[in-house]
């Protein structure tokens, strides 16, 4: 069974599944009202460790929706809040762990 990612913007949770089995759930930050995280089904199209903009923390995983991704943060106090420009922020140690568990091509479902 394929692994996939479920993102709940209202719960500020990212959950990793293998088929219907929950593997792990992580706290996240999501977009604020004016720059909301886009709902839909996307795929991870790339991974970039140590991205050039330090605000992305230790790792960037780009989504098939241009300009959006799952990434670490240099502001861990933002986790659990709706404060980003639409991306999904994770604690740096969590985004590294998640990245090690999912390949490029992993499906990401984002909903309220």
Image: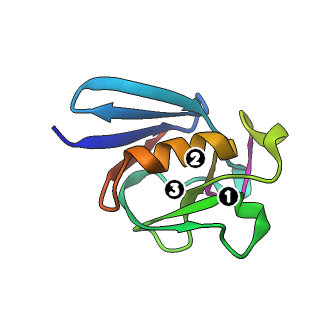
Q: Which residue is mark 1?
A: 58
Q: Nearer the viewer, residue 89 or 99?
A: 99
CA distance for labels 2 and 1: 8 Å
Q: Which residue is mark 2?
A: 95
Dot 2 and dot 1 residues touching (CB under 8 Å): yes
- Quick one: SS at disc 2? helix
Q: Determine the image quadrant of residue 81.
A: top right
- The residue range painted magenta reads 82-87
Residue 23 coordinates in the image, percent (x, y): 37, 26
Residue under the point 26% across and 33% down: 18
Q: Residues within 10 Å of mark 2 (few under 14, many from 20)?
A: many
- Quick one: SS at disc 1? loop
- The question of residue 58 being in magenta is answered with no
Could you tell which of marks 3 and 2 lies nearer the N-terminus? 3
CA distance for labels 3 and 1: 23 Å
- Circle number at residue 109: none
Could you tell which of marks 3 and 1 lies nearer the N-terminus? 3
Q: Determine the image quadrant of residue 71.
A: bottom right
Query: Please, is residue 37 above or below residue 50 in the view?
Result: above
Q: Determine the image quadrant of residue 11.
A: top right
Dot 3 and dot 2 residues touching (CB under 8 Å): no
Placement of the N terminus among the 4 image quadrants: top left
Residue 13 coordinates in the image, percent (x, y): 55, 32
Q: Which residue is mark 3?
A: 38
Residue 101 is left or right of residue 91, and the answer is: left
Q: Residues within 10 Å of mark 1 (few under 14, many from 20)?
A: many
């Amino acid at each position: 069974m394929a692994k996939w990612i479920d993102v709940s913007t209202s719960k500020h949770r990212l959950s990793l599944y293998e088929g219907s089995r929950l593997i792990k759930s992580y706290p996240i930050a999501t977009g604020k009202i004016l720059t909301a995280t886009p709902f839909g089904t996307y795929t991870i199209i790339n991974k970039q460790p140590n991205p050039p903009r330090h605000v992305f923390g230790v790792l960037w995983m780009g989504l098939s929706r241009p300009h959006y991704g799952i990434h670490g943060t240099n502001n861990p106090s933002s986790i659990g809040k709706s404060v980003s420009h639409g991306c999904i922020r994770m604690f740096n140690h969590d985004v590294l762990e998640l990245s090690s568990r999912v390949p490029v091509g992993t499906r990401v479902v984002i909903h309220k």
